[in-house]
Amino acid sequence: MVNSRKPFRINVGFIIHADIGHVGEFPFEFDKIKLDDLELRQFSGSAQVGRTPQGLILTGSFQGDTDLECVRCLKPYSHHLVWKLTELYAFSYKSVSESDLIIPEDAQIDLAPLLREYALLEVPINPICKPDCKGLCLECGQDLNLANCGHRQPEDDSPFSILKKLL
């Protein structure tokens, strides 16, 4: 049963008391979900939680669509994100990893902060709607994907501009 307020909270209590090597799988699928400030559509994925001597190893594969703004033409577009994660939730502070994750006393792990963090790592720094996006005219602001305004783009005055001819 999924909690509508905390849809990524999973109960791992049965895995904590299982034999080493036991794995539990938790599938997720949402038409629309919000991870703090990141909104995703067609979200799907699954998390596997396995018992180790040090704690619980969490691995997962996820995907979803989000809206971004193209840095060239400034139009919104849908971008598909795909990411994987692997983290260790330690039983004690002696076996904690660099992520400082400890299994909570109630054995309820909320995956939402981890999912958001890993998803944001997949968002491009300079999102482009399509590889051949022409962007906007620097002089009049016309979207060059729709029509050519007739303005010439300024020549690059960089000393390395000559190297473009080699491409």
Image: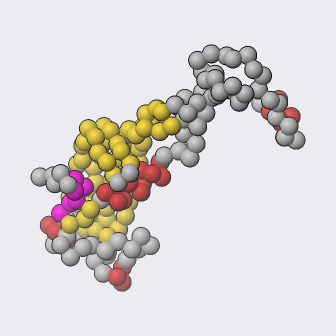
Spot occupied by residue 28 in the image (x, y as percentages of width and height): 24, 47
User: Which corner quadrant of the image does residue 73 belong to?
Assistant: top right
The answer to whether residue 15 is visible is: no
Q: Nearer the viewer, residue 161 or 72?
A: 72
Note whether 44 is above or below 53 in the view shown: above
User: Which corner quadrant of the image does residue 44 belong to?
Assistant: top left
What residue is rendered at 88% in x and 41% in y? 159
Query: Which residue in the rendered view is the most extreme toward the front?
Result: 140
Q: How many numbered discs, if any?
A: 0
What quarter of the picture does the C terminus occupy?
A: top right
Is residue 11 found left or right of 159 in the rendered image?
left
Q: Nearer the viewer, residue 77 or 65?
A: 77
Spot occupied by residue 13 in the image (x, y as percentages of width and height): 16, 68
What residue is rendered at 48% in x and 52% in y? 121
Whether residue 7 appears in magenta in the rendering, the answer is yes
Query: Which residue in the rendered view is the most extreme toward the left?
Result: 1
Q: Which stretch did the figure color magenta?
A: 6-11
Spot occupied by residue 93 in the image (x, y as percentages of width and height): 34, 82
The answer to whether residue 75 is visible is: yes
Query: Which residue in the rendered view is the most extreme toward the bottom?
Result: 94
Note whether 88 is above or below 46 in the view shown: below
What residue is rendered at 47% in x and 48% in y? 122
Spot occupied by residue 34 in the image (x, y as percentages of width and height): 31, 48
What residue is rendered at 18% in x and 63% in y? 11
Is residue 6 found left or right of 66 in the rendered image?
left
